[in-house]
Image (tube, grey):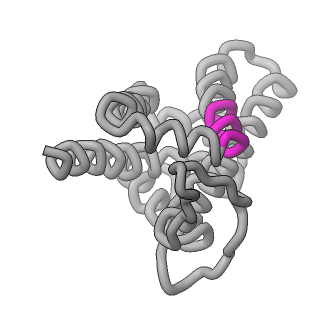
């Protein structure tokens, strides 16, 4: 039964990474591919009204891990408290920037929220990449099941999934997806 729950939690995490990862890429490339405010609004429109729906898979993953593997979740939150706190704030700021950035037709207002959008998505890609690299490398556990280690410890780009591999994947996959959703040239 544990293997089935592990498979369900893994499936939820993979679906989240695939769906929301394209949003990370669109956010990171937001200023590079769109030069005018109209083009920037078009990139945000390419993410569409479904950008927040992808986070449901992350919430489902967290709920599944909490229900089935509570000691794992407790150790992860204790060991990676700062990283999880940063991920939460980046998700909140990304949502706020998408929701309120286009409501006031002021260049300074929209420029600020575009900046927040780019920074939040870039930090999310970096934080999830570092987490994937640490999980692939292995996390040292104490005899009582706890751990504490630096979050950013290894930046090797090859050999396993790590920070730079994650970031490179997000930057490569987003333009292909965006080209199907917008009329902007790539």
Of all residues, the one furthest to the front in this rendering is 143
Residue at x 53% of width, y 49% of height: 144
Residue 84 within the segment the image draws in magenta: yes
Depicted 151 relative to depicted 19: above or below? below
* Quadrant containing the N terminus in the rendered view: top left
Comparing 124 with 59, the one in front is: 59
Residue at x 55% of width, y 36% of height: 44
Residue 17 within the segment the image draws in magenta: no
The image shows residue 48 at horizontal and vertical percentages of: 43, 31
Of all residues, the one furthest to the bottom in this rendering is 159
Secondary structure that dominates the magenta span = helix
The image shows residue 77 at horizontal and vertical percentages of: 58, 39
Comparing 20 with 153, the one in front is: 153
From the viewer's perspective, is 150 left or right of 129? right
The image shows residue 170 at horizontal and vertical percentages of: 51, 61
Q: Quadrant of residue 152?
A: bottom right
Of all residues, the one furthest to the right in this rendering is 108
Q: Quadrant of residue 64?
A: top left
Q: Is residue 25 visible?
A: no
| Bounds of the magenta segment | 81-90
Number of dots carrying numbers:
0
């Amino acid at each position: 039964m544990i293997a089935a729950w592990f498979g369900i939690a893994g499936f939820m995490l993979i679906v989240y990474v695939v769906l929301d990862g394209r949003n990370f890429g669109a956010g990171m490339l937001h200023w590079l591919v769109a030069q005018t405010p109209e083009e920037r609004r078009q990139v945000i429109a390419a993410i569409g009204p479904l950008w927040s729906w992808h986070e449901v898979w992350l919430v489902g993953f967290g709920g599944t891990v909490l229900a089935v593997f509570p000691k794992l979740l407790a150790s992860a939150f204790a060991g990676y408290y700062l990283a999880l706190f940063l991920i939460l704030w980046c998700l909140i700021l990304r949502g706020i920037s998408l929701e309120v950035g286009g409501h006031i037709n002021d260049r300074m207002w929209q420029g600020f929220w575009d900046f927040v959008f780019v920074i939040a998505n870039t930090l999310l890609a970096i934080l999830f990449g570092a987490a994937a690299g640490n999980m692939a490398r292995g996390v040292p556990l104490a005899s009582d099941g706890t751990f504490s280690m630096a979050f950013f410890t290894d930046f090797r780009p090859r050999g396993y999934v790590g920070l730079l591999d994650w970031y490179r994947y997000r930057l490569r996959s987003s333009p292909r997806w965006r080209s199907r959703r917008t009329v902007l040239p790539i």
